[in-house]
Amino acid sequence: MIQKLAFVQFIQARLNGAGGAPSDIRGVYHPRTIETAVGITIDDLIANNPSMAEAMALLMDVDITHCAPFIGTLPYSVIVPRGVYSITSNNMIYSIVTPYDFVAMQRYNPANPLAKIEKTLITLSQKPNEEEGTGKIQVLAIPNFRDLPQDAAVILEEHQTKLADMVVERLQSQQPQEKTNDSVRDGSQQRPN
């Protein structure tokens, strides 16, 4: 595991010359831009390399209210729905659905345990199986990298260097920020009609 801030600094160091970054992009990217690029890269990994992406998932314990609607708050926003691998409570498994489908599917099949996630709020269609009087669920999901606090531990396992390389490649393939921002400011970049 590595802290989010340390991982962003690791990528910044690569962009500043470690690993052979071209001189025209050294120091150009703000840490928030790098965070966004990491998030986009992780989203691409979920679609194209699910096993690598799943290694980045965090297991979060969430307390759920004891009366309907059954609501809980995740510690971090997560990538919905592809980055959510499981929502469970003892032997009950919830199906993750969109907010629109949540209402429709609840009416169609009320016996099916459903879950919807909006930002950090999770809503369940059925009360979790209680153990020792607490309504808890476990959510295995990939958090939105940009929304994590700077000191949050990020699970990258053996994929840290590969993910960093992918982010650097993504940033190097784009026009540097300063040039893009300057050209918009001085009007030299044409806007499409």
Image: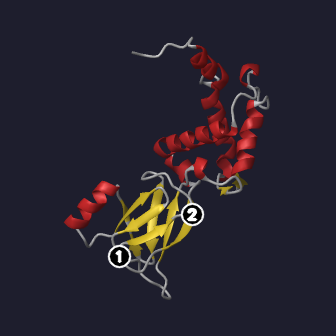
**Which class describes the residues within 10 Å of circle 2: few (<14), some (14-19), or many (20+)?**
few
Q: Which residue lies furthest to the top in this view?
A: 188
Question: Is there a contact, CB below 8 Å, between mark 1 and mark 2?
Answer: no
Kindly identify the residue that appears in the image at 20 percent across and 65 percent down. 108
Q: Is residue 140 left or right of residue 179?
A: left
Figure coloring: secondary structure
Q: Which residue is identified by label 1?
A: 68
Dot 1 alpha-carbon crowd within 10 angstroms: few under 14, some 14 to 19, many 20 or more: few
Looking at marks 1 and 2 on the same chain, the residue that comes earlier in the sequence is marked by: 1
Instruction: Give the side of residue 46 with respect to residue 17, left or right.
Output: left
Amino acid type at mark 1: Ala
**To which quarter of the image does residue 109 belong?**
bottom left
Q: What residue is disc 2 on?
A: 75
Q: Residue at x 65, y 23 (%)?
A: 176
Residue drawn 69% across the image and 50% down it: 4
Residue type at the position of mark 2: Pro
What is the x, y in percent for residue 73? Answer: 50, 66
User: Which mark is on residue 47?
Assistant: none
Q: Indicate whether 69 appears above or below 183.
A: below
Judged from the image, the secondary structure of the residue bearing numbered disc 2 is loop
Q: Which residue shows up at 59% across the image and 24% down it?
A: 174
x and y percentages locating residue 113 in the rendered image:
33, 70
Q: Nearer the viewer, residue 9 or 32?
A: 32
Q: In which quarter of the image is the C terminus?
A: top left
The x, y position of residue 173, in whole percent, is 60, 24
In this view, the residue farthest toward the left is: 108
Q: Quadrant of the N terminus?
A: bottom right
Residue 24 position (above or below residue 36) = above
